Amino acid sequence: MVTSQDCLNKYGKPENQNNMIVWTVPPTIQIKTVPQKIYCNKDMLVPLSKAFFNLIEQGIQDELKTWDGCFNIRKKRGLTSMSLHSWGIAVDVNAAWNGLNQKPTLSPKFVKCFIDAGFEWGGTWQRLDGMHFQLKSI
Ligand SMILES: [Zn+2]
């Protein structure tokens, strides 16, 4: 799993916002609930493009009900280490139905679209975080 130390080593301090870009999502992979411009790490472009493409190809893009953010400098909720959102390499979706320590409601097919695109899912962690996807490697 990518750690906050890995991110510090590669990107530096979150405050510097190194490697962050405003990504304009190409029209062919736009999903109506996802912003057309996403402020994220440049390392997210390929995996996130793939994830959106997979959702559309599978015809399940409507399962993405809410986009709950990418870049956000903060600690992991209730913990001391920094969340990978601090470096813009994590996204949250459908937060209202996939709260921390709650049984995730995302379909296996939906999750697979992200896994196949290079993400790790928080819904299998001991501390369930079903809304959360982060890059599997950087
Ligand atoms: Zn998250």
Image (cartoon, rainbow, N blue to C red):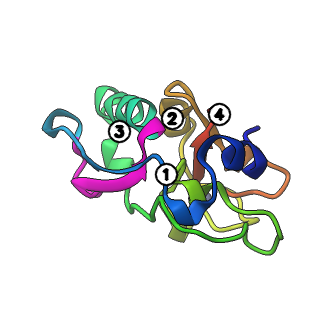
Q: Quadrant of the C terminus?
A: top right
Tag 2: amino acid: Phe
How many angstroms separate mark 4 from mark 1 (CA)? Answer: 19 Å
* Amino acid type assigned to the residue bearing label 3 in the image: Ile
Tag 1 near tag 3, CB within 8 Å: no
Residue identifier under label 3: 60
Depth check: give the residue in front, 108 or 94.
Answer: 94
Q: Which mark is residue 136?
A: 4
Secondary structure under tag 3 reads loop
Q: Residue 114, which numbered label?
A: 2
In the image, residue 46 lies at what x, y percent? Answer: 40, 29
**Residue 123 coordinates in the image, percent (x, y):** 69, 49
Q: Secondary structure at mark 4?
A: loop
* Residue 1, magenta (yes or no): no
User: The residue under label 4 is which amino acid type?
Assistant: Lys
Q: Quadrant of the N terminus?
A: top right
What is the secondary structure assignment of the residue under circle 2? helix
Camera-nearest residue between 82 and 128: 82
- Classify mark 1: residues with Cα within 10 Å, few (<14), some (14-19) or many (20+): some
| Residue range (magenta) | 30-43
Label at residue 33: none
